[in-house]
Image: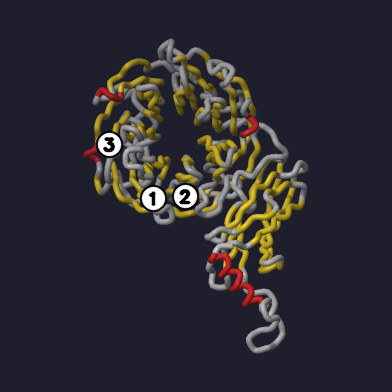
Amino acid sequence: MSRRAHAASAALCLALAACSGTDDGGGPDPGPAAVVLTRVGGDQQVAPTGTALPVPLAVRVADAEGAPLEGIEVRWRASGGGLVAPATSLTGADGRASASYQVGPNGGAEEVTAEAFESGRLVGSPARFAVRGIAGGPIVPVRSEPISANYGIHDTFVRDGVAFVSAWSSGLLLYDVGHGIRGGSPSRPVAIAGIVPPAGPSGVIGAIHNAWWFHNPVSGEKRYVFVGQEGPGSTGASSRGDIFVVDVADLTAPRHVATFHLPGAGTHNFWVDEAQQVLYAAYYDGGVAAIDVSGTLSGDVSSRLIANVRPGGAGSTYVWGVQLHRGSLFAIDMESGLWELAPSSGALATRSGGFNVPERWSSDLWMHGDYAYTGTWGGLPRSGNVGDVLKIWSLADGLDAPVDSIVLPEVGTVSDVEVSADGELLLVTAERGARQGLYLYALAADPARPTGAGSITVANGLHTGTFADVGGRRYVFAAKNPASPAMMVFDVTDAAP
């Protein structure tokens, strides 16, 4: 037993009057001491039956003053058919002990009880964890986290167990979904903090649209989050909004520290070349902007603009998103389609593509291997078509035209696309129509011909979605808005082939 554990044992022994059987005044045994057993992680999780929870169950044992107690035995008991391991664990120097849990086979409510013991004697009150098992499948909804109806939620960026929710007028909201700072999980997000940046040079307050948590491999810092603002605009004609830099060195106290402004335009989606410390931003009618984000960022950083190009030219540029892939920067333009740009040129020179989606507005893009996947929405006035198509492009064959497409019946907008990090799954979020929601496609067999891996209909549709791996399981974090807005979380681990 460590010295600290021995001291804790002595303190408990005295408090329990176990050494003498009486209190200091010679009266009767006062009973159990004020030992506090507190849940600190893993409560209220939801997972498919027969699977392990992504976040371990964790407790903290402390004395009456809140000081952690080391070396205390914690015993775990499961009811409801699940399995907890180990059955017994000891608290560390921080007073914490943990156990993993596998959900039972039957589904429904389950419970795990943690109890603290000192010298074989129960101390303090038990802590109980609620777990819910649900029938497995390719797409399992595990959480619908309400977001304030200040328009609601737009994008979600998930990294290192933290979800950065772009919640429009409510600002940027941070949730623990597996990081450990608040004991949250994908099925039980716990709020960490939030921030509404002040109005920038564009004069827009709120309208927080997207975010990127910058992990700088040069400095090793995880200090900055780049936050995009989608202000008022007119599709194909105008836009307004700035980029804010938020310091999250302390996740519990985010601070606005810098602003980037591109005159006459508003930003949309980002891609960050972290190795080169360059942020590429889609700027709607402003085209594509490359911004130096190296070093310390403070105040007005508009002078850090490296290059700016309108790939479709004046009147035919309204860039939705960008992605760096194999040394090229690809841009999807709502009006002029898919483009390949040369990021190292200093001027973002055009390499290929453009004017290759004549019948629809284009939406999101994702590059994977030798292929690109792009969405469509609405219908250009001259076409009358509904944007219900996922387009597939072969990079080896050039960008003159897509090589294939997938029509999503009874869907009016293919709004967001993304490929999982291992290249196995492609997600599509869909809005408008009787079958709006989330669609998954398998890519492992043939990325040129995605095959259906599951879908789920969501009332009011899903605007955006992103993959995140937490605790060995794969999730999709999606945005439901603006009616009854929510961050929706789906377990899609079993959708992979």
Residue at image location 58% in from the left, 36% down from the top: 474
Residue at image location 27% in from the left, 36% down from the top: 292
Residue 134 sits in quarter: top right
Is mark 1 in CB contact (under 8 Å) with mark 2?
Answer: yes
Label 3 element class: strand
Q: Horizontally, is 81 left or right of 74 in the view?
A: right
Work out whether residue 484 or residue 283 is closer to the camera in this orientation and state it.
283
Is the N terminus in the top left, top right, bottom left or bottom right quadrant?
bottom right
Q: What residue is shown with label 3?
A: 292
Residue 431 sits in quarter: top right
Residue at image location 39% in from the left, 50% down from the top: 248
What crowding class fits label 2: few (fewer than 14 Cα within 10 Å), some (14-19), or many (20 or more)?
many
Is mark 1 in CB contact (under 8 Å) with mark 3?
Answer: no
- Foreground tag (1 vs 2): 1
Q: What residue is shown with label 1?
A: 248
Q: Earlier in the sequence, mark 2 or mark 3?
A: 2
Image coords of residue 35 (percent x, y): 62, 70
* Amino acid type, mark 3: Asp
Q: What residue is shown with label 2?
A: 174
Label 2 element class: strand
Mark-to-mark CA distance, 1 and 2: 10 Å
Image coords of residue 266 (percent x, y): 33, 37
| Relative to 461, residue 338 above or below | above
Image coords of residue 160 (percent x, y): 48, 43
* Amino acid type, mark 2: Leu
Can residue 242 be seen in this snapshot?
no
Is mark 2 in CB contact (under 8 Å) with mark 3?
Answer: no
Mark-to-mark CA distance, 1 and 3: 19 Å
Can residue 215 be seen in this snapshot?
yes
